[in-house]
Image (cartoon, helix red, strand yellow):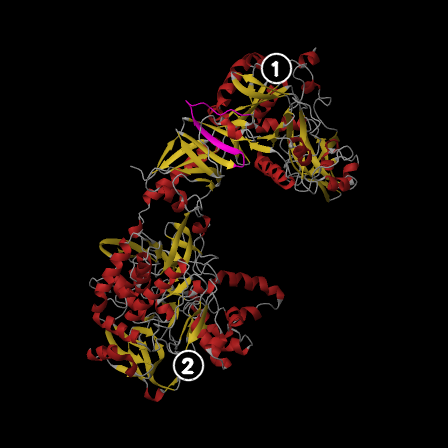
Amino acid sequence: MNYRLEPQPYEWISRDKTIRFTFEGREFQAFEGDSISSGLLANGQLILGRSFKYHRPRGALTLANHDANALFQTEAEPNVRGDVVALEPSMKLTACNVNGTVAKDKDAKIEYVARFLPVGFYYKTFHKPKKFFPFWEKMIRSKAGLGHVNTQWDAQRQSKSYAFCDLLVIGAGLSGMQSALAAADAQLNVVLVDENPFIGGSLDYQLAHEPRVKALRESLKESVSTHPNIRLYTSTLAVGWYTDHYLPLLTPHGMIKLRSRAVIHATGVMEQPAVFRNNDLPGVMMASGIQRLISRYAVKPGQNALVLTSNVEGYRAALDMFEAGIAVVAVVDMESIAQRGEWAERVLAKGIRVLEKHGIYEAIGRQTLQRAIVAPLSGESCDLSKKEIFDCDLIAMSVGWVPAAQLIYQAGGKLSYDDTLQQFVPEFLPKGIFVCGRLNGAFTVDQRIADAKAVAQEAVAFLKGQKESRDLTQYRDTTAHSHPWPIIEHPKGKNFIDFDEDLQLKDLKNAILEGFDNIELLKRFSTVGMGPSQGKHSNMNAIRVLARSQGLGINATGSTTARPFFHPVPISALAGRRFRPERRSPLHAWHEAHQAKFMEAGVWLRPEYYGASSARLDCIQEEVEAVRSRLGIIDVSTLGKIEVMGPDAARLLDLAYTMKMSTLKQGMTRYALMVDDSGVIIDDGIVGRLASDQFYVTATTSHADATYKILSKYVQFCGLNVRLVNRTGSLAAINLAGSESRKVLAPLTSISLSESNFPYLGMREGLLCGYPVRLIRVGFVGELGYEIHLPHNAALEVWQRLMVAGQAVGIKPFGVEAQRILRLEKGHIIIGQDTDGLTHPYEVGMSWAVPLNSKAWFTGKPSLARLKSSCQRQLVGFKLAQGAPKNLVKECHLVIDNNEMVGRVTSVAYSPTQQCVIGLVMLDQPYADTSNPIHIRVDDGRLIRGERCSLPFYDPEGIRQTSAVEEVLV
Amino acid sequence: MKSVQLTPITDWQAWILTGPDSTSAFAGIEIPTEVMTAVFSDGNLIAKTGRDEFLAFIKDTAAQPQSSWCFRRHDRILHIQGHAWTELMLCLCQFDFHQMQPGEWQMLAVAGINCWLWKDPHPDQGILIGFDPGYAEYLEHIFHDVINEIELRSVNLGGAL
């Protein structure tokens, strides 16, 4: 049978574009614009899923983004909402939470043991005997949950962006469009959002055939779409409210973080189900859901419909179904027809039977709806002596509404129950929050327009700083649109309050009897409202049940609130675009062209080594060898470089570093160790003095910005007359290291490199290859060497000229790995590698850098004075026996003594100079003070023995870096 | 025609000047008096970033500033133009660029990088953005990615755009 209707005036589908897709392996055909559910329903597939607990067959309910029992699994994603997610060509779909197929679910047998699974059973059962719990746990885990996450997923990221406006209007239905337009006409910068792909809201499905609103609809749509002061976001959900009207807008392209000065909520109302036996059968739907199916997707969800109503909307729905060719077998009005006015007359004029003061006692059907038992209401139960049975495959429920007020709750607004409307309506609204439309109890078209115009005026006045006051009740309807008790008891139950969690009326009653008689407790114990639709259909009826059982009014019973995000948000939208800054030195391209393999060093990319990946270790060893025997060159542009100037410059550096910098001679440098207030090492570098009031400071690669901030903080806190300039990015730096460095450098520079003019730890300014440079004679790698600090734009030319000049002596570029080995041979620590977040100078043998007696004050001094005598760890050097495998011991391997952990390896490498593996271990006291050999637990669990040795491993007298090497070699 | 165009500006020399001598270092060049404002005149852009601190972008052909604490910078500078430049920036920075006035100077984090921004006072001329040259590859890559994304996106924003 074809369930597709003739074209509808406001349908969303493109009939000229056919989509083929499969569901449970069967091929179906639909149109572009169809949702998954509408596409399946158009093909007569009425069962769309199975319920969470009992695996009962379920179908479409609302088509409004709340259908928690029509969740689908695609190849990539679980829990795809079939009622709103558009079909895509070649989609392969299955239902979630189904063991077999939707027609034949093997887990449906759970329903036969339902009486053993009452509300909250999982809190009470399966715990004893304890030994069986693993079995139950495994079974519960396999049955719990909905879809399956594909663990082979591809990382997806959607971009985030920011937006700003004067006024955000949420909901582009009649009220939203009208209020946005009025505000935009008053020159406000308006953002209008709607979760649907098209604007119009209920105008296009509940009033689609109403000639009186045709002109209004066209006019509003045209005006809001073209107004220069309105930005219109469709398919966009405002999913949360945060302080100062900061709202995340979930769009198909990602999340927009919108900051608005005020917000109008025109979010409308959500239809509520009636509660009767088997009210969950496929074929039982909200009346508005049926209208959406007809108007948006031109799908006829059944042939013979029964309408259960307690408002005029039910009569309108009956007329819409009649227009769509559905036989309306009867309208069952829970109250008197006298209240329904012209709509009832129109229904009667079509020859449709109306049963007033009746209710549906039971829906009947094996897999889908087939019949319904209708009976007169006697009080709040059915008089079965006068029951009638109607053959029908569709029941339209139109018994009430709740406001879509989640964001208002989040903003701190309060709602109260209106006994006239039998609905929650806003009572108190925080500053800048406004409401209009059905959410505010304005139901007729005239009421909604008047309310929307009034709220726009109110918002404009607020934003102009004028006093605004509005009577929220002014345009509210005076007749109820919700039934106060749309619940019919049945001795056999299966009258569901919560379709998400399979909660029946008796479940809530039992929970209340067990003492969970507060709405928040009832929610948590029974899980009502905690499923995928987050109580959108269940909370109101649950409140009614609790209120009645306690003999309280609805207001006294209270309601739960919805935390942000009140609607599911994909992780990809939360992730946003990845901002992972990557910094490159001015020599990056040269390194790349010379086979550098890069590694991350903080935000920087640095050459790890040069050469083929397959020969990594050999390349690194050759680079070490070149520095030790001839000449190496390394790009150290990543070092922090800070100018410190002013009359108080020396005082600042005395304060910030442990060692005294005010005594530093002009043209000389000194090792600079920075600790925090607790004495923990946080950075090191060198300080060089250029003039009495000017210093040049270097910092480690990863701490450069932090060091600059710390120095800036001291300047501010101490009121020092100092200027700081962070030149890390503007200057490059090159280290030329090795016995041939002076010979190669000398012809290229205006600076005299002689030992007498430029001693070890000296710093000189001059020209190199015609560029202004600073040369610093330091030796991190333990050889005669010069650190060249030069302008960013000079780096490439100078590097290349040094390479040419050094060619004759066999110059070789070296990377970070070789540098690490070279410094390890010298016993120099790397902050952050050989230290951790608790390491102080005494633990790493740097007491020489802590002048407690000779310096009046420096940051961390009081702490270090105490720590000096209570050193709990010690950094110790070790060697493995010659011939031991080079890669057996790794950094972070543990040192074990008598099966106790007594330390860890902080640095380890094969030393070409020592011809063995060397390293540093941080050992606990008192073990560190013994002379015991150390035993390191390696990856395969073996203990590898190492011998302690003094530091440094190489050139302990420091002759190679401090003297003229030519003299040493002689 | 792309919705956003990025054009590198290479004919300026960038400087940072600080200290009591900084104000007198600009021979004949107009300088701003208020902190966090900028003046553009005779092809030079000078921003006052502190009590006595300036960022100066001086034409290659003009006399460069001279003072004791005057240091060269090597900022990467891009001119961002096109009707969607605000959309690009709003994907990368949480500042409300619609509120940015012609000639306004800002120092903001863009895609996680500290940048300075200056809005060209001429209508539809977009903005200049300057940042550490080490981040040039990263930031320009992000800019191009976002521009491509904006162009692929067919969002109807109603009458406002």
Q: Nearer the viewer, residue A302 or A743?
A: A743
**Residue A731 on image: x %, y %:** 53, 27
**Residue A89 on image: x %, y %:** 30, 51
Magenta residues span B50-67
In the displayed structure image, the side of residue A950 where residue A798 appears, left or right: left
Q: Is residue A856 magenta?
A: no
Q: Nearer the viewer, residue B53 or A826?
A: B53
Q: Is residue A812 above or below residue A326?
A: above
**Whether residue A10 is visible:** no
Q: Is residue A26 above or below residue B127?
A: below
Query: Same chain for marks 1 and 2?
Result: yes
Report which quarter residue A696 is drawn in.
top right
- Tell which subunit mark 1 falls on: A
In which quadrant is the N terminus of chain A drawn? bottom left
Which residue was labeled with disc 2? A490
**Residue A101 on image: x %, y %:** 37, 62
**Whether residue A302 is visible:** yes
Residue beneath the point at 69% across and 12% down = A969
Residue A742 disc label: 1
Residue type marked 2: His
